[in-house]
Image (cartoon, coloured by chain):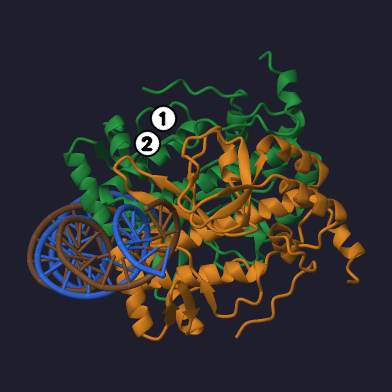
Chain colours: A orange, B green, C brown, D blue
DNA sequence: CGAAAAGTTGAGGATCGTCAACATCTGTGG
DNA sequence: CCACAGATGTTGACGATCCTCAACTTTTCG
């Protein structure tokens, strides 16, 4: 059903380096840069707000452990969750285009993040165009995932939306952890899932129950088993955006050739 | 109601250089690069498909004249319009992360585009980190506009969506043409507007009629007058994403200081 | 002028939201 | 280890928003 995931660099146990190394052979210097990004650590508890909307965007963050999410809230309290962030994700790149954060950031579980001042970003820019291109490409992947989300919310009904959502999370998890198989723990409340998909918590509950009764998924506590992956893919018109990217245009492509014997 | 738009570089009559120059003081070399991007021109008629979904992403495009849009279509024909592209926009940057286009591209009016092979992108990357940062920042703006769209589709009802949509277009137009005032021609069918906002053409028609009767907008042929901009802003919780960006972190910031006397 | 595209309006219906009551889970402190 | 409070999940009844279908009008363009 699915190819074996192949990675360019061996797994390191560091989720950021693992994620980057999934796409690109990393040089010693690249790894040093990425390690430097994660020098500081800071933890938050579930439901803690890491950064409010409108806060200065001096920092962006690398997710070390745990899940968190970005969101916007309207004056009357309506909330839209914009992105779920997993270990290895870089958070807040789009925000650095502005002086103040356009999204809020909140912990979905207990989390450990590595804050990194955006002023130090230009070191990477000038030092490693190759890493710059990869960071930019990861931003483009996020972009394309957002496009999928728009299509999902704009043109699909509730069960299709939930199906797509579950598959997207599974794909994302498979990058940093190729052995996920077909089940995973989903530490997100149904209200949060609803706020991601433009639904209410009530309707998410109903939809999940229906999908379980239809044999598409199974639930034990908060873990989900994808019982019929192909069925879900068909109904949600799903495509994996994380699996394979095009790095052929990267500057310094020669580096890959140098160490291609591995 | 709104500050006078200030631009870093004088208007040139070239819409890409105008847009970039709105945000950044451009060097002679930068202008040469941007001119080079627009060396080739190609035209399409209304409704022509410029690039199908799944086509190779060898090229991206700069919009010279006219409006076009990116979209996805599902197997059963449901369409989601993802972005409207105006003169001065760079199209297809997110697609270069993949070997095949994830979106289609179609002409909303007669258009003239400048195709540019993505393989030549690394010249800009290595040659002008400053321009690279600006291109990346423009990508982040697109990203944030997408976030707004998700909030709009996911959590707003029809009249709020349409209000937000009109204001977004107005903001975008004001960058390359500061004298738009409060009315502009909208060369988009109501079906296309619906496919952008997750609505049907029928409901867009009803909503526009209601908004006109409420005195929020006026319509003459295909041109729209924003009769009550503040009212629309309030109901759509609108924020201008194009108006001001943060360029302080750009590499080569010294260049700006050198020519800051202007 | 004629055909295709685009816009309008009405009637009826489906999907999803709201409200509310209740059940269950989780974590913290006594 | 238990008790309790807060958070989370479930289910039902009802209603609102928006969709579908369809007929018709108006505009656009070769």
In the visual, does A25 lie left or right of A66?
A: right
Q: Which residue is mark 2?
A: B184
- Return the x and y of residue B205 as percentages of the image width and height: 24, 52
Picture residue at 73% right of the left edge, 74% below the top:
A6
User: Rounded to the nearest whole Å, what is the CA distance between mark 1 and mark 2?
Assistant: 7 Å
Given contact means CB atoms under 8 Å apart, are the residues at marks 1 and 2 in contact? yes
- Return the x and y of residue B210 as percentages of the image width and height: 19, 45
**Above or below, comparing residue B37 to residue A3 in the picture:** above
Q: Disc 2 is attached to a residue of which chain?
A: B
- Return the x and y of residue D3 as percentages of the image width and height: 30, 62
Picture residue at 58% right of the left edge, 29% below the top:
B22
Which of the 4 quarters of the picture holds residue C12? bottom left
Q: Is residue B67 visible?
A: no
- Return the x and y of residue B194 as percentages of the image width and height: 33, 56
Q: Is residue A164 visible?
A: yes
Viewer-proximal residue among D9 and B139:
D9
Picture residue at 81% right of the left edge, 47% below the top:
A128
Which of the 4 quarters of the picture holds residue A160? bottom left
Quadrant of the rendering where the N terminus of chain B is positioned? top left
Q: Which residue is mark 1?
A: B180
């Amino acid at each position: 059903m699915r190819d074996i995931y192949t990675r360019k660099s061996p797994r390191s146990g560091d989720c950021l380096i693992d994620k980057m190394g999934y796409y690109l052979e990393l040089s010693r210097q690249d790894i040093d840069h990425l390690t430097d990004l994660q020098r500081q650590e800071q933890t938050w508890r579930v439901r803690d707000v890491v950064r409010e909307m409108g806060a200065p965007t001096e920092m962006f963050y690398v997710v070390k452990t745990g899940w968190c999410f970005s969101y916007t809230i309207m004056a009357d309290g309506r909330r839209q969750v914009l992105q779920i962030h997993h270990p290895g994700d870089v958070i807040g790149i789009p925000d650095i285009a502005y002086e103040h954060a356009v999204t809020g950031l909140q912990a979905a579980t207990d989390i450990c993040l590595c804050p990194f001042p955006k002023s130090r970003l230009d070191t990477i820019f000038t030092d490693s165009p190759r890493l710059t291109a990869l960071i930019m490409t990861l931003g483009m992947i996020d972009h394309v995932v957002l496009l999928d989300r728009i299509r999902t919310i704009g043109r699909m009904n509730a069960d299709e939306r939930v199906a797509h959502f579950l598959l997207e999370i599974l794909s994302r998890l498979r990058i940093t952890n190729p052995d996920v198989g077909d089940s995973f723990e989903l530490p997100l409340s149904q209200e949060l899932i609803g706020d991601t998909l433009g639904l209410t918590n009530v309707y998410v509950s109903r939809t999940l129950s229906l999908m379980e009764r239809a044999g598409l998924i199974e639930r034990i506590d908060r873990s989900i088993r994808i019982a019929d992956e192909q069925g879900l893919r068909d109904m949600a018109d799903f495509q994996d955006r994380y699996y394979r990217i095009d790095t052929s245009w990267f500057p310094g492509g020669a580096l890959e050739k140098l160490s291609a014997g591995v």
